[in-house]
Amino acid sequence: MTKVADILTTMEYGPAPESAKLANQWLDAHSRAFGMYIGGQWTTPTPDRMIDVINPSTAKRIAAISHGTADNVDAAVAAARKAFKSWSQMPGHARAKLMYGLARKIQKHARLLAVLETMDNGKPIRETRDIDIPLVARHFYHHAGWAQVMDTELPGYTPVGVVGQVVPWNFPLLMLAWKIAPAIAAGNTIVLKPSKWTSLSALAFAELCDDAGIPPGVVNIITGDGGTGDILLQHPGIDKIAFTGSTEVGRHIRNVTAGSGKKLSLELGGKSPFIVFEDADLDSAIEGIVDAIWFNQGQVCCAGSRLLVQEGIAEELYRRLRARMEKLRVGDPLDKAVDIGAIVAKAQLVEIETLVRQGQAEGAILWQPSWACPTEGFFYPPTLFTEVAPSATIAQVEIFGPVLVAMTFRTPAEAIALANNTRYGLAASVWSEDINLALDISGKIKAGVVWINSTNVFDAAAGFGGYRESGYGREGGREGMFEYLKPRGLYSEGAPALVPAASGANSRAVLAGVARLNSAIDRTPKNYIGGRQARPDSGYSRAVRGSSGELIGEVGDGNRKDIRNAVEAARAASGWAEQTAHNRAQVVYYIAENLAARRVDFAARLSQSTGVDAGDALAEVDASIDRLFTFAAWSDKYDGAVHRTPYRAITLAFNEPMGVIGVVCPDERPLLSLVTLMAGAIAMGNAIVVVPSEAHPLLATDLYQVLDTSDVPGGVVNLVTGPRADLANVLAAHMDIDAVWCFATPELVTLTERASIGNMKRMWTSSKRLHWESGDAGLIQEILRQSTQVKNVWAPYGA
Ligand code: NAD
């Protein structure tokens, strides 16, 4: 028998098991076979269509869930559609009360949910009890608040409709909360599919919805594998898709839903850097690393899986880290003193083992603690790779396990280059006692979340989501609400009138202008690239015809190479993003001033090109000048936020520019639509490559001179005229463009959305006519949102 005196010598941990009794009783009460929750009813499980639920820490079967069919999906979507009308029209306060009640239920049953999640997923009870479930409850409370204040805080927005949601297995209930809370707060109804490996907590949640009186059909839970998910997301009755999972599946979803008009948010993979500078508090940094890569066995989308260490402290940091790793405890996740639980499934364990072998084969040095993991269940020890080449597979691929790869750097610039040397951009963690350095680095990292001297901090009030191939969309906070809303009156039927501007004298001047244009000496404009006119690569020109078919000029026939050159010029103009918002505003005002000086010329060109009468043409020019003023005004007013998160940290939300945006303009209102899109994008700090209206390109080429005289730095605005569909496809497929806006036919929208999957660029497309004439907040705010992505920087404090 162990004596107390022995324990004092060895300091061994005793067992501290959390009881699984109530969770087992709950499973027994359901005969360990679950149906699905559709329209407030439970389907009966059919024995020949079940999926086993395995406890990953024992490898034993603990229950079975239903494998959802196309009929089940139909029924769930129909139930959600039926419930949408009354749920969306319910006063915000009524929705808020129901959601508040649901949050209370989650808290009341917190321990059952935590134990169930641990049994189903394998993650330590310490995490489910202290992190996952409290954050789930917090998410519903926070969003109950959004339901309450939506009418006054988000006026002019309506819910999107029926939302199809698919979540992964790593945070089953937390990801569900991130999806369902904002969706139903905004008045949508949902059909959600959890991962086939971890559906139990979603089913327990459905019971809580029932208990809390959430009306039937508002929340529907179907279970099944990726095939069931595919049927759900491709279902024609879904208005919006919200997906969290791997980039590979995200790419598939973007591909198969191209042209469907479904609103899409994708929260995908990551390979996030954890950067330690030599002035960091190393003991804190070590605890940060433990949290960054061994929290949830490293199965975290934003895991700090790439350790970047400043060279001078690398050996010391590795030494301390190895000592800490030696003391980590892997084992029964229901044991309250265990740090690392089980990997979710055998298949994932095999995947991790394969990548680790590959890391060794590619020459990196592996280190693991001396102790062995339990052999029953799916366990993997904490692992450190050093001497990793930045291009090694393990430095580039998301391992999704407890495996850290370390690299060194010398200077801050090198740290940034290494940090951004990834196709992902989900999160980053920066460790330094120098706040100047930390904030500077935070601004230069391409990631949606940056934690200074901290890691893996989340809250419902702060948005979370990625840059680049980590997807698009945000969850949490105000920005997360917009994912589930659409502005009223963004689109218009027909062509609404503009505010008339013409006096008789002006109209005569426009008519004279048209005559002048018609008799002018031919000047074939080239493309506009890097602030200069550039001859099109093809060496061809194309004819431009006026409203009655007459030849009114020629423009360059741009091709793939011209687009490539334009993208290169736009990328080289990155200094524009770093200018002050005040400076950018001045440039946009200057464009307005110079356009105003040529008001009659542009009206004449509009009249000549489109056949509108002089009054309408002048009104369009005036509206364009007005639009430039609007975005110049917004340039230094589209602020971020400081979130009120429940930590001793300030959370700064910045609206950062997207980067390089490809803009495919519509034919309607050829000047106004072009100027609106251009002004919004550049006012926010983007550089753009524009494909102007194919029918009316001379409006765009006339702008060259205006841009030249308005101090627009070369490369900020690039214009390539030519065959719109071909050029749009090149833009959409280009790997160095961050977003594409395309206003075109349904066919072209489909093609560009499909072509965008290479680097998962953010798409804003419409084959409906946008209400360009309206200066409404809806249109302006949409453009500002599409021009930016939110980065949340967390900076903890404390003396
Ligand atoms: P996964 O992409 O394999 O599966 C995610 C979900 O999609 C599951 O429910 C699955 O059944 C479903 N699915 C699979 N194929 C589908 C298809 N063709 N159509 C529709 N649905 C389909 O991902 P996973 O292995 O469950 O989760 C791990 C991934 O999730 C990692 O890449 C991780 O980074 C990512 N993740 C991202 C975030 C984030 O917020 N960015 C959060 C958690 C996890």
Image (cartoon, helix red, strand yellow):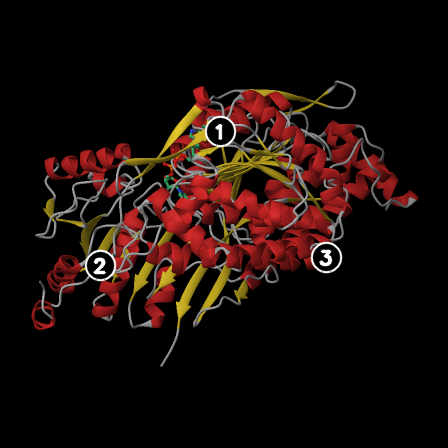
Amino acid marked by disc 2 = Pro
Identify the residue at image location x=39%, y=40%: 169
On the rendered image, what quadrant is the C terminus found in? bottom left
**Residue 330 in the image, given as x and y percentages of width and height:** 20, 52
Mark 1 and mark 2: Cα distance apart in space: 40 Å
Q: Which residue is mark 3?
A: 93
Earlier sequence position, callout 3 versus callout 2: 2
- Say which residue label 2 marks: 15
Say if residue 577 shows up in the picture: yes
Is residue 557 visible in the rendered image? The answer is no
Sequence-earlier tag: 1 or 3: 3
Identity of the residue drawn at 29% across and 48% down: 298
Q: Secondary structure at mark 1?
A: helix
Say if mark 3 contacts mark 2, CB within 8 Å.
no
Q: Which residue type does callout 1 highlight?
A: Gly
Q: Nearer the viewer, residue 594 or 359?
A: 359
Separation of residues labelled 3 and 2 (CA atoms): 47 Å
Percent coordinates x, y for residue 683 in the rendering = 58, 53
Residue beneath label 1, please?
A: 229
Which comes before the other along the chain, label 1 or label 2? 2
Which disc, if any, is residue 60?
none
**Dividing the picture into quarters, in which one does residue 162 lie?**
top right
Please provide percent x and percent y for residue 208: 56, 48
Mark 2: give few (<14), some (14-19) or many (20+) Cα within 10 Å: few
